[in-house]
Amino acid sequence: MTTTLEPPGTAATTDTARVELLAGADWTAVCDWSRLTPGRGVAVLLPDGRQAAVFRDSRDAVYAIANQDPFTGAYVLSRGLLGATADGRVYVASPLLKQRFDLSTGECLEDSGVRVAVHPARVARAGVRRR
């Protein structure tokens, strides 16, 4: 699941914005918006110790999935490259074995029986508390 709360170029996409993930019942700030480069990911640590991979696409949508590659067990999905299928599904390709994971559903595009967890994500202005 992805959410962009403000259109690109507004106050939420400046250096004062942050990316938040829904961790349990609470939204948790995981990185500054300025740390995300379109097409690249960052690894973040959630309060419960799990790792997530956070991505920003070329349209400034934010996605978050589990960082662990289910085929190798390595925590590397944040280092994968973003792409899109012909029908517009945004995915990350694992840097190891190159399987592609849909960033909205977590589904592996090469093996529909394999999924990674998807974390709801949003962009919020620093200092603005949202529920």
Image: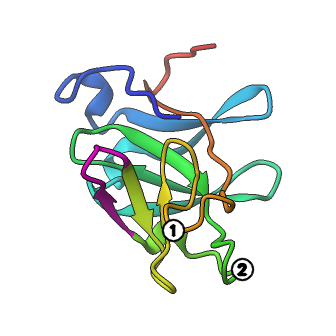
How many marks do you count on the picture?
2
Image quadrant for the C terminus? Answer: top right
Coordinates of residue 44 in the picture (x, y in percent): 59, 58
- Mark 2 or mark 1: which comes first in sequence? 2
Query: Please, what is the three-letter code of the amino acid marked with disc 2?
Result: Gly
Coordinates of residue 1 in the picture (x, y in percent): 53, 34
In this view of the protein, which residue sits in the foreground, 4 or 130? 4
Q: Residue at x 16, y 28 (%)?
A: 9
Residue holding disc 1: 110
Q: Residue at x 51, y 85 (%)?
A: 97
Coordinates of residue 73 in the picture (x, y in percent): 72, 80
Q: Residue at x 57, y 14 (%)?
A: 130
Which mark identifies residue 81? Answer: none
Establish if 108 lies above or below 104: below
Q: Say if the magenta span includes residue 7.
A: no
In this view of the protein, which residue sits in the foreground, 91 or 110? 110
Q: Secondary structure at mark 2?
A: loop
Which mark identifies residue 73? Answer: 2
| Outermost residue to the left | 9
Q: State which region is magenta.
A: 81-89
Instruction: Give the left or right position of residue 126, taking residue 49 as reference.
Output: left
Query: Please, what is the three-letter code of the amino acid marked with disc 1?
Result: Glu
Colour scheme in the image? Answer: rainbow
Establish if 86 lies above or below 78: above
- Distance, label 2 to label 1, CA atoms, is 17 Å
Q: Alpha-carbon neighbours of circle 2 within 10 Å: few (<14), some, or many (≥20)?
A: few
Coordinates of residue 52 in the picture (x, y in percent): 62, 56
Q: Residue at x 56, y 61 (%)?
A: 108
Instruction: Give the left or right position of residue 46, taking residue 1 as reference.
Output: right
In this view of the protein, which residue sits in the foreground, 110 or 123? 110
Label 2 close to label 1 by CB (< 8 Å): no
